[in-house]
Amino acid sequence: GGDTLKPFIAFVLGGPGSGKGTQCTKIASDFGFAHLSAGDLLRHEIASGSEKGELILDIIKEGRIVPSEITVELIRKAMEMSNAKRVLIDGFPRCEENRIAFERIVGTEPDIVVFFDCPEDEMVKRLLSRNQGRVDDNIETIKKRLKVFENLNIPVVDYYSSRGKVHKIKATGTEDEIFDAVRRLFSSLSRRAYDM
Ligand code: AP5
């Protein structure tokens, strides 16, 4: 029955500025995925002016990771609202605790994990030249975000690698060049994804 069908889930990981958001927008429009960005969901909560949003803002300003329950609950709700058959979850899970909370609360694992591999100096360069600078796009916070990525996010990528789920994409070059590799990956998957 359609209602109980689990969506095809792709987690999209990569360091800050690796181009996750940029590429997810393209994947969403070319391959019919809903694009849920953990960072955007959190920033949306901040913009709502709620008490929870204030707490989130304090954490984001410092480049730290927001508590798993908050993030996973936002993602769970967004998945439910979108009711999509194919979902990109961009910038999540950030750490082992995130990963485990997702499995517990949403009750499933991703079908694939796309990892955008980008050198640090390139990521820093992109973030510092981002047009509408975000509160966390200053060099001090960027350094913290990179450290959090190295220490907490890479172990999650390693975990999924050991389970054969990771598709690594070289994230240097132009947006179009990177999307060529992304397109090849999603085209090869699409038969599976579209059958879900
Ligand atoms: P989040 O919003 O996820 O930010 P991030 O991971 O730091 O990544 P960015 O959005 O900055 O970069 P991106 O990889 O999406 O690259 P983009 O396409 O934008 O998270 C922000 C914060 O929220 C975290 O630090 C944390 O505090 C919190 N948070 C998020 N998720 C959480 C979670 N699960 N749990 C707890 N806390 C969480 O590109 C970057 C720039 O480069 C853009 O200006 C773009 O135009 C440009 N660009 C893109 N591609 C190219 C290219 N090929 N060449 C040149 N420039 C390019």
Image: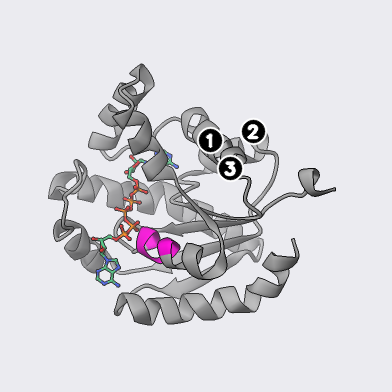
Q: On the rendered structure, is 78 left or right of 23? A: right
| Mark sitting on residue 130 | none
From which residue to which does the magenta span run?
20-25
Secondary structure mainly formed by the magenta segment: helix
Residue 87, image x and y in percent?
A: 58, 54
Per the image, label 1 sits on a secondary structure element best described as: helix
Q: On the rendered structure, is 121 left or right of 55? A: left
Q: Is residue 139 above or below residue 73?
A: below
Q: Residue at x 56, y 34 (%)?
A: 77
Mark 1 in CB contact with mark 2 (< 8 angstroms): yes
Q: Is residue 91 rendered magenta in the image?
A: no
Residue 114, image x and y in percent?
A: 52, 64
Q: Which residue is mark 3?
A: 79
Q: Residue at x 65, y 66 (%)?
A: 164
Q: Is residue 10 above or below residue 172?
A: above
> Quarter of the image holding residue 100?
top right
Callout 3, which amino acid? Answer: Met
Q: Residue at x 21, y 63 (%)?
A: 126
Task: Give the quadrant of ligand 1.
Answer: bottom left
Q: Which residue is mark 2?
A: 105
Query: Marks 1/2: CA distance?
Result: 7 Å
Residue 55, image x and y in percent?
A: 32, 23
Q: Nearer the viewer, residue 19 or 167?
A: 19
Callout 2, which amino acid? Answer: Ile
Residue 150, image x and y in percent?
A: 37, 54
Q: Residue at x 63, y 62 (%)?
A: 162
